[in-house]
Image (cartoon, rainbow, N blue to C red):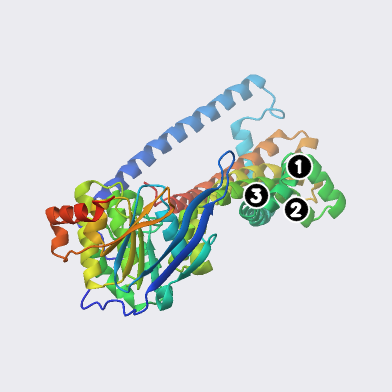
Amino acid sequence: MAAVMGSTLTEPIKIRVDRKVFPAVGERDEQLVLSNVAFEVEPRSFLVLTGPSGCGKSTLLNIVAGLDTDYEGAIDLGPGKDRMTYIFQSPRLLPWRTVYDNILLALPDGDPRVANIPAMLARVGLTEAANAYPERLSLGMQRRASLARGFILEPDILLMDEPFVSLDDPTAQSLRQLLIELWNSHPTTVIFVTHDRAEAVQLGTRILRLAPGRASVVQDARVRLTPAERLDRAVVLAEQTRIFAAA
Amino acid sequence: MAPGSTPISSTRRRANASAAWMAGFERLGWVVASLLAFVALWQVIAMIANDVRRFPTPAAVLETVMQLAASGALWSNIGVTLVRVALAFFSAMIIGSVIGILLGKYPRVDRFFDPWLVLFLNLPAIVTITLCFIWGGLTQTAAVTAVALNKIPSAAVTLREGTRALSRDLNEMALIYKFGWWKTLRHVTIPQLAPYFAGAARTGLALIWKIVLVVEAFGGNGRGVGYQIFIAFQEFDVSTILAYALAFILIVQIIEFTVLQPLLARVNRWRR
C-alpha cells in the first residue's frame, strides 16, 4: 500500500465508566466489574489495557466498542466513531466465505479500497490463501486474515482484544511485528487488551493496568521505546521490569 | 473475485474429480445389482403366488406402466400430484421457516406459542386432512392446505433450533463492520440457517410425498396419483397400484438426485 496517510484525528477519545456490574446469576451474587474508570486516549497513541484475566479489560473494550451498553458512564469516541474497527480475540471470519470475500465484505459496497485488497493480502502473507475458506487455514493465518480485514478500512480508532493469544511464540511475534509495521505506516488510535506484559510493553506507547479486586485502573505508565527498540527483546524486557517493578 | 488458484491445486482438484467419478461408478454398480436382486425376488414370489391379479409379476406391472403412459393417464395424474406437492412443499417451508425464525428470535413469543406447536406436532395427519375437507370442501386449496399443515410444525421446530444456534460472535462482527440488515441476512444469517433449511426440506419432501397420496385418496376429485390408487384399490387392481407407485418413486428419486443433492453439496462446499 503506497503512501498510506495516518489518521487525521485531533480529538482524544474520552472514556468514563462509573459502574459496570454483571447481574446475579443463580447462586452467584451481583459482581462489580468496573468502578470509576476514567481516562482519555490521545490521537494516534497505542494504549494497552493489561491485567490478569477477570479484571474487566475485555468488558471495558466491549463498552468502548458499543457492543455492551449496560453500564453507567459515557464514552465519547469523537469524530472518529464512524471509522472504528474491532479486532476480536477469535478471528470471527465467515467460514462460508473465502478469505478474499471476508475482507471484501468489511468494505461498503462499491468502495474504491477494493483495489487495496491484493496488496493487503500480500502484506499479511495470504496471497496464496485468497480463495481458501477460513476453516482450512491455521489459526495464525485466520488471525492474519482478521488483521487484514481490520486494516483494509484504514480505521481512525482500532480496538484489539488479545488478538495474538493461543498462538505459538514465533507466530505471535511475527504478527506483532506486522502490527507494528502496519501501525507505523498508518498510525491510528489503538486500544489493545492483553494479559501479557511483554506484549504490552513491546506494542504500547502507554499502559493502563487494571486490578480485579479494585475493578479499576491501578497504574498508568508511559512506554519509552523507539520503534527499533521494540524489536529488541532485551530492551523490551528492561522496560517491562522498569514499568512493572512496583506491581 | 480473487486472483486465480495455483496450478498445483487445480491438478489436485482434477485428480479428486476423477476419483469421485470412479467412486460414483462403483456406487452405481451396487445400486443396479441390488435392484436386479429385488426384481428377481419379486419374480420368484409372484411365480409361487401364481395369482396375476393379486400379485402380478414385474413384467405385468411394466406392461401396465406402458399402457398408462401410452394413454397419457400416468403423466397427467403424476403432473397433478407434483403440482400439489410443490404448492404444499413451498408454502409449508416458507410459513414454517418464518414461524420458526420468529420463535427462535423472541423467547417470549416462543414461551407463549410452544404449547400450540406441540399440539400441532402431535395432531394426527388424518385429523388435519378430514377437517380441511370438511371446512374447505373437496378443493385444490383444501388438499394443499391439508398437506402443508402436516409439515409446517416440524419445519418451524427445525428453524427455531437453527435460529437459537445463531452465532452472537458473528452478529457482533457484522455490527462492528457495519454490514447493515441485508448484508447481515445474506452473508451471516442465511448461511448459518442453510443446513437447517436443507434438513427441513429433505424430511419435508419425504413426508409430503407420502401424505399427498393419502389426501388425494381421501378427498380426490378424480385426478392425482392418490385418487388413481384409491380407484385401483376398489377394483383390486394391484398392477395399477404398483405401476403408479413405481413411476412415482422414480420421479421422486430423480428430483432428489438432480435438485436436492446438488443444492446440499453447494451449501456445504465451505466445510472442511
What is the spatial separation of the Cα atoms under label 1 and label 3, in whole angstroms? Answer: 13 Å
- The residue to which callout 1 is attached is B119
Tag 2 residue: B145
**Between marks 3 and 2, how big is the CA–CA gap?**
16 Å
Q: Does residue B198 appear in this view?
A: yes
Label 1 Cα crowd, 10 Å radius (few <14 / some 14-19 / many 20+): few
Q: Residues within 10 Å of mark 2 (few under 14, many from 20)?
A: many
Q: Which numbered disc, 1 or 3, marks the residue that appears first in the sequence?
A: 1
Residue at the top extreme, as displayed: B48
Host chain of mark 2? B
Q: Amino acid at mark 1?
A: Leu
Q: Is residue B151 left or right of residue A123?
A: right
Mark 2 or 1: the one toward you: 1
Marks 2 and 1, how far apart at CA: 17 Å
Q: Nearer the viewer, mark 3 or mark 2?
A: 3
Q: Residue at x 81, y 50 (%)?
A: B132
Do marks 1 and 3 both belong to one polypeptide chain? yes
Can you identify the residue that label 3 sits on?
B156
Q: Tell me residue A44's x, y (percent).
A: 29, 72
What residue is shown at x 15% (from left), y 59% (from top)? A231
* Towards the viewer: A15 or A66: A15
